[in-house]
Amino acid sequence: MFKLKIQDKETKARRGVLKTHHGDIQTPFFMPVATSGTVKALCKQDLEAGGAEIVLSNMYHLFLRPGTDIIQHAGGLHKFMSWDKPILTDSGGFQVFSLSKFRKITDDGVKFRSHIDGALHFLRPEDVVSIQGILGSDIMMPLDECAPFPCSEAKAKKAVERTTLWARRARKYFLSSSFTEKQQLFGIVQGSHYKHLRERSAEEILEIGFDGYAIGGVSVGEPVDMMFDAITTVAPLLPKDKPRYVMGIGLPDQIVRAVGEGIDMFDTCIPTRYGRNGSAFTSAGRIAVRNGAYTHDLRPVDEKCDCHVCKNYSRSYIRHLYNMNEMTGLTLLSHHNVYFYLNLMKNIRQAIEEKRFADFQKEFLACYNSTS
């Protein structure tokens, strides 16, 4: 259940709370990505230190390894990964989409070969809901078809039609199961960069009726302006009393912009991926700590950050760890980056509460973009 608490008057930013079986989540929020049941290089204490209230895992990866039987034996995904707060599981539609050479999509479902061992699998929309029911995630996403970029209008139209077909089947199966007592099922709007297809998809998904709504098929290689065209097209069409989720974005400035368009939920693997590649996010933009410019830099990663990394370690030291291939360096940067994202969301929520989000957005984007 979602409760809208504050609607910003100068922008479309919203402040609310999303209630789930494993606890309430303050919106807008960011979900650290725990694809296979863990956020890479971090433990749950790191996430708790940053104030994470929810993580995102991926059904596709968990289905292939370790397998639902092992997770079911452990008592569900929460117990398996020792995380007692909410979890959202993605259906893996994007992962299947990326396996273009190893999958076949039909109206009945998706046939694909595992990227791990080449084993052949077939998943219907009902199977995807059933598997997520076994995982026990608080929020589950249905199987959808993510159109690539660029793609023809005909291909995007077919993806919309198939996404709607699968959504109806997923919702019907969900409502006939016992999952509704503890889990929520969101709908996904597709349509690529075609405005009329986005509007059609939104209308069809809304007609089915879901617990929340996601804008999918973005951040798949299209220009940023085109991505925001999709967001500004779909967001106003979504009901005010349901949470709004943009899947897979993004960079800090993109998140701040999207909050201003009325989006409540975000996820991306960028914080840990960039951390493993020697980059850090700061209040002034992104810096490549691995570079020689930081060899003698004894400042913290971000002088405005109060995470334990910035309190205890210098850019120079972290650069040394990274260039020596020490795992500690990757962990420290990943911890800081995830903390930065979570703290950014905390500051966004506070700005909305204090009715100064428009100023916050303007100041953040001016400072962040100036050196990114």
Image (cartoon, rainbow, N blue to C red):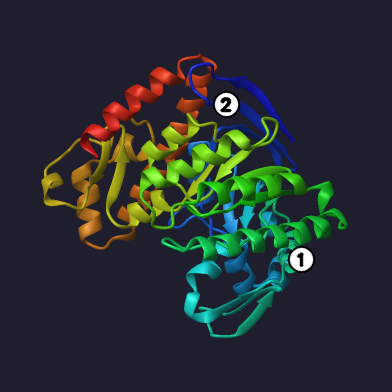
Neighbor class of circle 1 (other Cα within 10 Å; few <14, some 14-19, many 20+) is many
The image shows residue 24 at horizontal and vertical percentages of: 68, 34
The image shows residue 315 at horizontal and vertical percentages of: 22, 43
Camera sees residue 203? yes
Quarter of the rendering containing residue 60? bottom right
Going by the numbered disc 2, the residue's amino acid type is Arg
Answer left or right for 146 relative to 69: left
Q: In this view, does 195 lie above or below 123?
A: above
Q: Earlier in the sequence, mark 1 or mark 2?
A: 2
Task: Identify the residue under disc 2.
Answer: 14
Task: Identify the residue under disc 1.
Answer: 126
- Quadrant of the rendering where the C terminus is positioned: top left
Q: Residue at x 47, y 36 (%)?
A: 258
Number of callouts in the render? 2
* Helix, strand or loop at mark 1: helix
Q: Which of 134 and 230 is in front in this view?
A: 230
Q: Which residue is drawn at 53% across and 26% down?
A: 13
Q: Nearer the viewer, residue 195 or 88?
A: 195
